[in-house]
Amino acid sequence: MSEAFGPTFLTVTDEDGQELVLEFLDALEYNGQLYQAFFPAETEGEAEDPDAGLVILKVLHEDGEDILSTLDSDEELEAVYEQFMETLFDEEE
């Protein structure tokens, strides 16, 4: 994905009906599944959340559309998080 046009933002709705604006960071495939990483976007007038961190969602294909979903387990989250950290730190070097 080219960053020549600036960052990519998307809005998702959580299970409580709250809208979250996320900034796309990176994507990777792990064990045959596509995952995307995001940072919560800072919006004007909102206090910075010290607990805001990397958000990882998996891409599911349903009815010909891509749908973002939470991960199924803490183990899956930890494994994918480690993959993203390796990828992101390798790119910085």
Image (cartoon, helix red, strand yellow):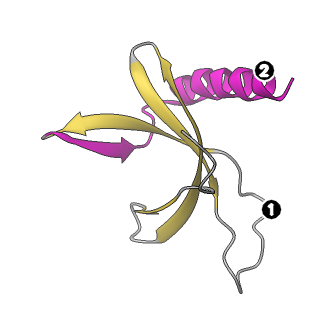
Residue type for callout 2: Asp
- For the N terminus, the image quarter is top right
Give whichever of 50, 90 is nearer the camera: 90
Pinpoint residue 47: horizontal percent, then vertical percent: 76, 78
Mark 2 vs 1: CB contact within 8 A: no
Chief secondary structure of the magenta portion:
helix
Q: Residue 90 — which label? A: 2
- For the C terminus, the image quarter is top right
Magenta span of residues: 64-93
Q: Tell me how far mark 2 sits from mark 1, CA to CA.
A: 26 Å
Pinpoint residue 42: horizontal percent, then vertical percent: 69, 70
Would residue 66 be counted in the magenta stretch?
yes
Instruction: Say which element carries label 1.
Output: loop
Give whichever of 67, 78 is nearer the camera: 67
**Residue topped by disc 1:** 50
Residue depicted at 45% across the width and 12% down the height: 31
For the view shown, which residue lies furthest in the right direction?
A: 93
Pinpoint residue 39: horizontal percent, then vertical percent: 65, 52
User: Label 2: few (<14), some or many (≥20) within 10 Å?
Assistant: few
Residue type for callout 1: Pro
Please tell me whether mark 2 or mark 1 is closer to you in this view: 2
For the view shown, which residue lies furthest in the left direction?
A: 63
- In the rendered image, the vertical position of residue 59 relative to residue 49, given as above or below: above
User: Label 1: few (<14), some or many (≥20) within 10 Å?
Assistant: few
Pinpoint residue 53: horizontal percent, then vertical percent: 71, 50
Number of marks in picture: 2
Instruction: Say which element carries label 2.
Output: helix
40 relative to 36 in the view: left or right: right
- In the rendered image, the vertical position of residue 39 relative to residue 79, given as above or below: below
- In the rendered image, the vertical position of residue 4 relative to residue 56, given as above or below: below
Task: Answer with mark 2 or mark 1, whichever residue precedes in sequence.
Answer: 1
